[in-house]
Image (cartoon, rainbow, N blue to C red):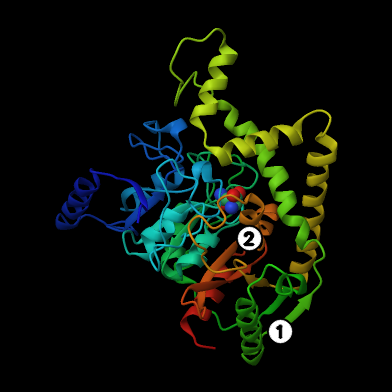
């Protein structure tokens, strides 16, 4: 499936060590023996990490990501690193230096992206849970395409220390699993304040996995513009509409609300994330670490140019150039400042909605998994796959995709739910209820 870039040889040693602990009657961690894989953008000390890029091919992590450190402390086994789009930029896992990852349901289809390898690893039982990163949907969208649960917490819930940066004000580590209990258990282990990441929130972390019962009746909103969107598959639209009726019959209040800004989310997301990416990726210049082009150079500039031209793939080039453009002196106000203003407006209107409603629901993606190659040469089409997911990252709220539906083309698809900042517990409890009960 090409879901793994590397399986770590020392995983067996680690398993033996954990068995030994158990045999010696030592206290066991919450994740004792749980087999976890990590997206190839998360650092695991003394193991390679490459962001699926030639630029970092053969680079070895110097330290553990905080999330990895905490998994290890609770007895998890990190079994390997998952394939993904280069530097987490993409929606199909086709932009990888190591080649495309295939969807386990149908190998001619993409698994989604950018955390496609993580999704397939869990889908095909190669790992029990996987950590991905979600900057604009990269956990929820592949979870939708692969028929599993994908969860992105509130921005800052999980430390980003040791996560290779794409767009720092959007990036968040997310969790793939087959059920909500597993997601919750992993979340309570890895979430929480961290001295190494000043954006990590200081909130108390409850035992999510023990608080999953939900008997509440909720107030839920959905956007009219989302269900009427021209890019939405008609069958997905009608499945969500009939699900809304079921939720009403189950005693929840569901309102359609106007959200005129929906069409502004993707442009805003791509202006801001490319700007942040162009800055974050400037460190890959062939000087301190990673790939360096070979040959003799007349100047430092020449070495930078050749290294960066050869080391990055096409999509990363596109984004660095776009990001540099929107930050350039003559265009800064027209694009970057404008996009920041729209981000602010989005935050305000979402906050207003959450003062009246507990959840906002939508499809996770406008279509089911598409063919490998189908959108590879049309960036705008590809970006539309993020239509429903980028909002949660623009405003920083938690969001989940749960596998509730099956299309007549036999592929699964999910329901996306968002809640307000730090209300993970509501999101997880209600998701658990919806997955466990046939409402
Ligand atoms: N598909 C989106 C992008 O290409 C989201 C990626 C992500 O969440 N890492 O930017």
Residue 226: percent from left, percent from top: 72, 70
Where the N terminus falls, by quadrant? bottom left
Up the image or down, 439 lies above or below 381; here it is: below
Residue 103: percent from left, percent from top: 42, 62
On screen, residue 232 versus residue 161, left or right, reads right
On screen, residue 167 versus residue 407, left or right, reads right
Dot 2: few (<14), some (14–19), or many (≥20) neighbours within 10 Å? many
What residue do we see at 19% from left, 46% from top?
Answer: 13
Up the image or down, 72 lies above or below 277; here it is: below
- Residue closest to the far top: 298
Residue 44: percent from left, percent from top: 38, 40
Up the image or down, 214 lies above or below 175; here it is: below
Residue that badge 2 annotates: 389
On screen, residue 26 versus residue 160, left or right, reads left
Residue 164: percent from left, percent from top: 51, 39
What residue do we see at 51% from left, 67% from top?
Answer: 144
Residue 60 image-quadrant placement = top left
Disc number lying in front (1 or 2): 2
Within 8 Å: ligand 1 and the Cβ of disc 2? yes
Answer whether labels 1 and 2 touch (C-beta < 8 Å): no
Up the image or down, 268 lies above or below 321; here it is: below
On screen, residue 15 versus residue 256, left or right, reads left
As measured in the structure, the alpha-carbon distance from the residue carrying label 1 to the one carrying label 2 is 23 Å
Residue 160 seen in the figure: no
Element under label 2? loop
Pick whichever, 210 or 41, lies toward us. 41
Residue that badge 1 annotates: 253
Element under label 1? strand
Dot 1: few (<14), some (14–19), or many (≥20) neighbours within 10 Å? some
Where the C terminus falls, by quadrant? bottom right
């Amino acid at each position: 499936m090409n879901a793994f870039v590397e399986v770590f040889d020392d995983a067996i040693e680690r398993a033996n060590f954990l068995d030994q602990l158990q045999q010696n009657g030592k206290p066991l961690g919450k994740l004792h023996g749980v087999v976890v894989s990590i997206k190839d953008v998360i650092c695991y000390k003394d193991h390679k990490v490459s962001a699926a890029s030639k630029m970092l091919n053969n680079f070895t992590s110097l330290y553990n990501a905080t999330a990895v450190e905490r998994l290890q402390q609770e007895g998890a086994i990190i079994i390997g690193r998952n394939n993904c789009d280069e530097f987490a930029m993409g929606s199909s896992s086709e932009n990888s230096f190591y080649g495309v990852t295939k969807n386990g349901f149908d190998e001619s289809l993409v698994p989604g992206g950018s955390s496609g390898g993580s999704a397939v690893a869990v889908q095909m039982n190669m790992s029990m849970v996987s950590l991905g990163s979600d900057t604009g949907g990269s956990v929820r969208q592949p979870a939708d395409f692969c028929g599993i649960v994908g969860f992105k917490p509130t921005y800052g819930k999980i430390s980003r220390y040791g996560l290779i940066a794409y767009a720092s004000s959007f990036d968040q580590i997310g969790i793939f699993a087959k059920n909500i209990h597993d997601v919750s258990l992993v979340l309570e282990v890895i979430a929480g304040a961290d001295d190494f990441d000043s954006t990590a929130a200081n909130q108390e972390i409850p035992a999510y996995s023990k608080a999953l019962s939900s008997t509440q009746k909720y107030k839920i909103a959905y956007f009219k513009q989302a269900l009427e969107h021209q890019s939405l598959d008609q069958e997905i639209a009608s499945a969500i509409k009939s699900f809304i009726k079921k939720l009403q019959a189950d005693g929840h209040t569901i309102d359609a609300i106007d959200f005129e800004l929906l069409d502004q989310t993707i442009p805003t997301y791509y202006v801001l994330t490319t700007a942040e990416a162009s800055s974050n990726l400037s460190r890959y210049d062939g000087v301190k670490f990673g790939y360096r082009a070979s040959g003799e150079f007349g100047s430092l500039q020449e070495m930078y140019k050749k290294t960066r031209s050869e080391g990055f793939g096409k999509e990363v080039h596109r984004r660095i150039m776009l990001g540099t453009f929107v930050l350039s002196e003559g265009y800064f106000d027209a694009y970057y400042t404008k996009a920041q203003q729209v981000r602010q407006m989005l935050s305000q209107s979402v906050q207003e909605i959450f003062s009246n409603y507990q959840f906002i629901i939508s499809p996770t993606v406008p279509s089911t998994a598409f063919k490998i190659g189908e959108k590879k040469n049309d960036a705008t089409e590809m970006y539309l796959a993020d239509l429903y997911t980028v909002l949660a990252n623009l405003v920083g709220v938690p969001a989940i995709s749960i596998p509730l539906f099956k299309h007549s083309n036999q592929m699964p698809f999910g329901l996306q739910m968002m809640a307000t900042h730090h209300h993970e517990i509501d999101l997880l409890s209600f998701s658990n209820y919806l997955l466990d009960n046939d409402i």
